[in-house]
């Protein structure tokens, strides 16, 4: 059996992030913690954000590393943090920060699954309303389906 791309432990609830960069570091730290990426991958996530915003709309940001950081990814994984207070993401409000690391082109498939969930306004409201990390994980579990 392959490992889930989004195990329950990678989903967290947080009150607030001090800044966009702190939110990126928190999402990256989960990926490091579970052994999906090398610690340097977080620097590449910050570097990418500096050149292009990863804010996607509907309260969602998907920070990920640069193409040059591919060798720092050990396995594909996601981290999800939902913030009670929106994070200022270059003038937009992000409540969901989804850290992503994808081996080869797996990140494209993962991104499309996340995009489908977040394109549904009712689904986003359910995600905002989830009272526990477990409930949030259950609502996002379709990203684990191959």
Image (cartoon, helix red, strand yellow):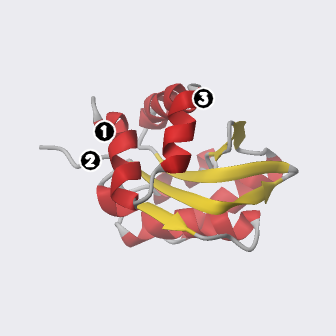
Q: CA distance from mark 1 to mark 3?
A: 21 Å
Question: Which mark is nearer the camera, 1 or 3?
Answer: 3
**Image position of 63 (left or right of 101):** right
**Image position of 135 (left or right of 21):** left
Mark 2 in CB contact with mark 1 (< 8 angstroms): yes
Q: CA distance from mark 2 to mark 1?
A: 6 Å
Q: Residue at x 74, y 74 (%)?
A: 18
**Which structural element holds mark 3?**
helix
Measuring from the top left, give residue 86's x and y in whole percent: 72, 58
Of residue 130 and residue 44, the one placed in the foreground of this image is 130
Q: Which residue is mark 3?
A: 121
For marks 2 and 1, the one nearer the N-term is 2
Please give the label number shown on residue 144.
1
**Image position of 9 (left or right of 51):** left
**Which structural element holds mark 2?**
loop
Measuring from the top left, give residue 146's x and y in whole percent: 27, 29
Q: Which residue is mark 2?
A: 4
Q: CA distance from mark 2 to mark 3?
A: 25 Å
- Image height of 5 relative to 38, above or below: above
Q: Residues within 10 Å of mark 1 (few under 14, many from 20)?
A: some
Q: Residue at x 60, y 29 (%)?
A: 121
Measuring from the top left, give residue 50's x and y in whole percent: 81, 55
Quadrant of the rendered image containing residue 11:
bottom left
For marks 1 and 3, the one nearer the N-term is 3
For marks 2 and 3, the one nearer the N-term is 2
């Amino acid at each position: 059996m392959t490992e889930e791309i989004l195990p329950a432990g990678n989903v967290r609830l947080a009150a607030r992030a001090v800044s966009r960069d702190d939110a990126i570091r928190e999402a990256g730290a989960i990926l490091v913690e579970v052994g999906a990426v090398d610690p340097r991958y977080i620097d590449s996530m910050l570097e990418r954000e500096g050149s292009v915003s990863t804010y996607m709309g509907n309260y969602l940001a998907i920070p990920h590393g640069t193409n040059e950081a591919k060798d720092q990814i050990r396995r594909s994984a996601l981290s999800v943090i939902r913030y009670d207070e929106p994070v200022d993401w270059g003038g937009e409000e992000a409540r969901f920060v989804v850290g992503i690391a994808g081996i080869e082109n797996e990140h494209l498939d993962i991104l499309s699954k996340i995009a489908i969930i977040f394109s549904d306004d009712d689904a986003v409201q359910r995600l905002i309303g989830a009272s526990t990390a477990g409930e949030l994980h259950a609502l996002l579990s379709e990203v684990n389906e191959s």
